[in-house]
Image (cartoon, rainbow, N blue to C red):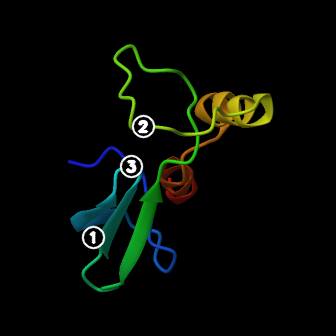
């Protein structure tokens, strides 16, 4: 089960990853499907690692990502704490 909370841009139902394939150590291609059968939207997505936020305790010498600057680290902290999840927002609006 995916831990990503991705929503369909058309009907706002949850999207699920049907299949994915690794292209590179830092890049994964995913094929996603809307869980709303009436909608039927399918899309291709790319998930890419771009910056190191925290160093590994078991570093692999082949892994070289730029270290995230303070702006990126602050965005990650802010997003994790105070950005509402879109699905939660939709459920609140429907209630």
Of residues 11 and 27, the one nearer the viewer is 27
Give the CA separation, mark 2 to mark 1.
35 Å
Query: In the structure shown, which secondary structural element does the residue marked by tag 2 occupy?
Result: loop
Residue under label 3, please give it. Answer: 4
- Horizontally, residue 55 falls left or right of residue 40, namely right
- Horizontally, residue 77 falls left or right of residue 58, namely right
In percent of the image, x 49 and y 80: which residue is there? 10
Outermost residue, front direction?
61
The relative height of residue 36 versus residue 22 in the rendered view (above or below) is below
In front: label 3 or label 1: 3
Query: In the structure shown, which secondary structural element does the residue marked by tag 3 occupy?
Result: loop
Give the CA separation, mark 3 to mark 2.
23 Å
Q: Residues within 10 Å of mark 3 (few under 14, many from 20)?
A: few
The image position of residue 80, as x and y in percent, is 59, 32
In percent of the image, x 33 and y 44: which residue is there? 3
Of residues 71 and 78, the one nearer the viewer is 71
Residue under label 1, please give it. Answer: 35
- Among the two numbered marks 3 and 2 on one chain, the one whose residue lies closer to the N terminus: 3
Q: Residues within 10 Å of mark 2 (few under 14, many from 20)?
A: few
Instruction: Please tell me the numbered disc located at residue 18.
Output: none
Query: In the structure shown, which secondary structural element does the residue marked by tag 1 occupy?
Result: loop
Give the CA separation, mark 3 to mark 1.
14 Å
- Among the two numbered marks 3 and 1 on one chain, the one whose residue lies closer to the N terminus: 3
Residue under label 2, please give it. Answer: 63
The relative height of residue 2 versus residue 76 in the rendered view (above or below) is below
The image position of residue 81, as x and y in percent, is 62, 28
In percent of the image, x 62 and y 38: which residue is there? 66
């Amino acid at each position: 089960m995916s831990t990503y909370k991705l929503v369909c841009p058309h009907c706002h139902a949850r999207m699920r990853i049907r299949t994915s394939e690794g292209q590179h150590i830092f890049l994964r291609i995913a094929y996603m499907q809307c869980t709303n059968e009436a909608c039927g939207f399918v899309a291709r997505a790319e998930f890419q690692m771009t910056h190191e936020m925290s160093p590994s305790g078991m570093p692999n010498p082949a892994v070289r990502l730029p270290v995230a600057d303070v702006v990126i680290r602050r965005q990650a902290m802010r997003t994790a704490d105070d950005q509402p999840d879109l699905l939660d927002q939709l459920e609140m609006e429907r209630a």
